[in-house]
């Protein structure tokens, strides 16, 4: 969870927490997306059409438009799950694969906005010193700027901090 990882005050504890946040997200066992709109969806009958709806709802969600949650998803993209009604969960990767294989082509353009959630060829290996957490190649400043351009952060300088976290370990 991103919110409890960063103290509200601007003191030493906040700076220290932010300096370790990439490692926390990379070492996580999973990234669980808790968005109020997704959590209202009943997935008892999980059809391809419902999976398409889920991906569209995720792409347009408040969660996907926040800069800090984008960082969380980007660093934890090796295992992303979505939370729904009745505390049911579904793998993002599995949902995306099912829609890719059996779903409608017209949703593809919308899904292009979810690239930061995809497990990537940029995952180089697992690092034993990080308890098996994945190691990703760094992205450059232009790529980080692109990911952040339509996302908001609650504090004015946060986007700069997040861009640095995306481009440096």
Image (spheres, rainbow, N blue to C red):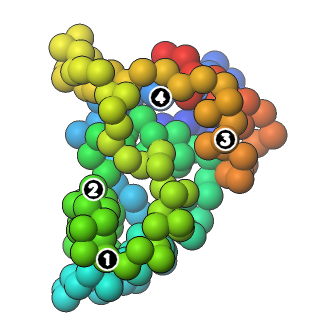
Mark closer to the observer (2, 4): 2
Mark 2 lies on residue = 93
Disc marking residue 21: 4
Q: CA distance from mark 3 to mark 4?
A: 21 Å
Q: Nearer the viewer, mark 3 or mark 4?
A: 3
Report how far apart the C-alphas of labels 2 and 1 lie in the structure. Answer: 14 Å
Residue that numbered label 3 is attached to: 146
Nearest the camera: 162 or 9?
162
What kind of element bears circle 3?
A: helix
Q: CA distance from mark 1 to mark 3?
A: 27 Å
- Tell me how far mark 1 sits from mark 4, CA to CA: 36 Å
- Of the two numbered discs 2 and 4 on the same chain, state the one appearing first in sequence: 4
**Going 39% across and 59% down the picture, which residue do you hit?**
33
Task: Please state the horizontal and vertical placement of residue 85, each as a whole percent of the image.
Answer: 31, 80
Label 3, label 2: how far apart the Cα atoms are:
22 Å
Q: Position of residue 162 (x, y in %)?
A: 63, 32
Q: Are marks 2 and 1 in contact (CB under 8 Å)?
A: no
Q: Earlier in the sequence, mark 1 or mark 3?
A: 1
The numbered disc on residue 72 is none
Mark 2 or mark 1, earlier in chain: 2
Question: Is residue 3 among what the camera can see?
Answer: no
* Relative image position of residue 109 (x, y in whole percent): 53, 66
**Identity of the residue drawn at 53% across and 46% down:** 70
Q: Is residue 125 above or below residue 129?
A: below
- Which residue is disc 1 drawn over? 103
Q: Nearer the viewer, mark 2 or mark 1?
A: 1
Secondary element at tag 2: helix
């Amino acid at each position: 969870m991103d919110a409890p990882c960063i103290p509200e005050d601007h003191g030493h504890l906040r700076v220290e927490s932010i300096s370790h946040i990439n490692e926390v997200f990379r070492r996580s066992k999973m990234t669980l997306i808790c968005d109020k709109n997704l959590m209202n969806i009943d997935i008892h009958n999980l059809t391809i059409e419902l999976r398409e709806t889920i991906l569209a709802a995720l792409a347009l969600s408040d969660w996907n438009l926040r800069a800090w949650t984008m960082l969380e998803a980007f660093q934890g993209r090796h295992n992303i799950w979505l939370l729904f009604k009745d505390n049911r969960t579904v793998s993002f990767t599995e949902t995306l694969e099912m829609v890719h294989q059996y779903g409608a082509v017209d949703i593809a353009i919308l899904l292009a906005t979810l690239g930061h959630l995809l497990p990537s060829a940029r995952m180089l290996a697992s690092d034993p010193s990080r308890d098996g957490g994945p190691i990703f190649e760094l992205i450059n400043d232009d790529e980080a700027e692109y990911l952040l351009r339509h996302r908001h952060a609650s504090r004015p300088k946060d986007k700069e901090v997040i861009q640095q976290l995306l481009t440096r370990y």
